[in-house]
Image (tube, rainbow, N blue to C red):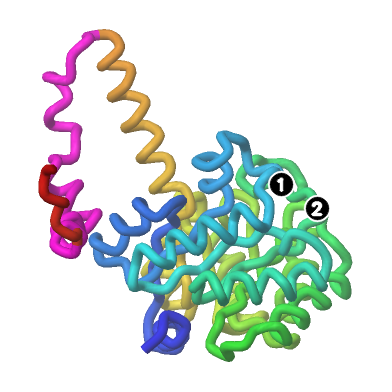
Amino acid sequence: MGTTQQLRRLIEAPGILLEAAVYDAFSARIAERAGFPSVLLSGNAVSASLLGLPDLGFLGRAEMVQVARNVAAAVRIPVIVDADTGYGDALAVRRLVQELEQAGAAGMMIEDQVSPKRCFLLGGHPPVVPVAEFLGKVEAALAARQDPDFILVARTCAEPAEGLDDAIRRARAFRAAGADVVLVSLTGGGTLPQLERIATEVGGPLAVNLEEAERNPGVSLDACKRLGYKLASFPGVARYAMGRALREALERLRAEGSARGLADRLMPLAEWNRLLDLERWAAQQPPSAPAP
């Protein structure tokens, strides 16, 4: 079974799918070994890891497709690609779908912000495009896919600037246009009453970002499961964990001039090699040529 079929079955199965948000092939391998059934390739995290830049639209289509190709080749679980605004108009979205399918992705997420986008987590009130314009992208994406199981997640970022009523209207329109999953991004992650209203008025399948939302009373993975949400992610956990651990280790190394005090913070070499399938690759390596 291909990864697109795997992902569609996971979404159609009872319960809620918790996916790990990753930024490269190695973090995806770690997520797979941790038991996650799918991963989300985060645009914010890839912008940071690949370019060292904030999520303000610097990351381009070709760069994201290449990272997606690397990640999909490194794991056996489905990969959903955060494709920002689709990197252009409806025609660009058509090409994007074709390239992501060829890269081995199982799905993608696009959002209705204007270009260049501004990451929702950076605050403010990011402007959104007219509904008709984004629906053109949704329709283009659905028409372009060769694999009917390739998942399209349509995300609206309208709530901060336009209010929840408008965000719900947009989400319902995206769903009616054929989007497989809909995500309504909410200020501060959203409250339980907001999430309940979205579940009631939009219908599923629905996705939710829980990283900020969990700080609000009553919001949890179990609560979202009870409301019928199908996809849940904590977009920053992997990148924040990596950033802090790396910063602290290197600061200590610089201060002490030795790695002796870091042993309990470092991944053992044997585990590193297992994550990279060293033994399997080494077994396939041709023997060295005899010395002359």
Question: In which quadrant will I find the N terminus?
Answer: bottom left
Please tell me whether the stretch drawn in magenta is mainly helix, strand or loop: helix
Residue 73: % across, % down = 40, 66
User: Disc 2, disc 1: CB below 8 Å?
Assistant: yes
Residue 198 visible somewhere in the drawing:
no
Q: Is residue 94 left or right of residue 230?
A: right
Quadrant of residue 29 in the image? bottom left
Compared with 280, 254 (above or below) is above
**In the rendered structure, which disc, 2 or 1, sits on the residue that comes first in sequence?**
1
Crowding near the residue tagged with mark 1, few <14, some 14–19, many ≥20 C-alpha atoms within 10 Å: some
Residue 57 is tagged as 1
Q: Tell me the amino acid under the disc marked 1.
A: Gly
Residue 101 is tagged as none
Crowding near the residue tagged with mark 2, few <14, some 14–19, many ≥20 C-alpha atoms within 10 Å: some
Q: For the residue labelled by badge 1, is the local secondary structure a helix, a strand or a loop?
A: loop
Residue 258 visible somewhere in the drawing:
yes
Compared with 65, 243 (above or below) is above
Q: Which residues are magenta?
A: 256-284
Residue 261: % across, % down = 14, 19
Q: Which residue is mark 2?
A: 115
Q: Which residue appears at 48% of the width and 53% of the height?
A: 235
Q: Tell me the amino acid under the disc marked 2.
A: Ser
Q: Is residue 106 left or right of residue 26?
A: right
Q: CA distance from mark 2 to mark 1?
A: 7 Å
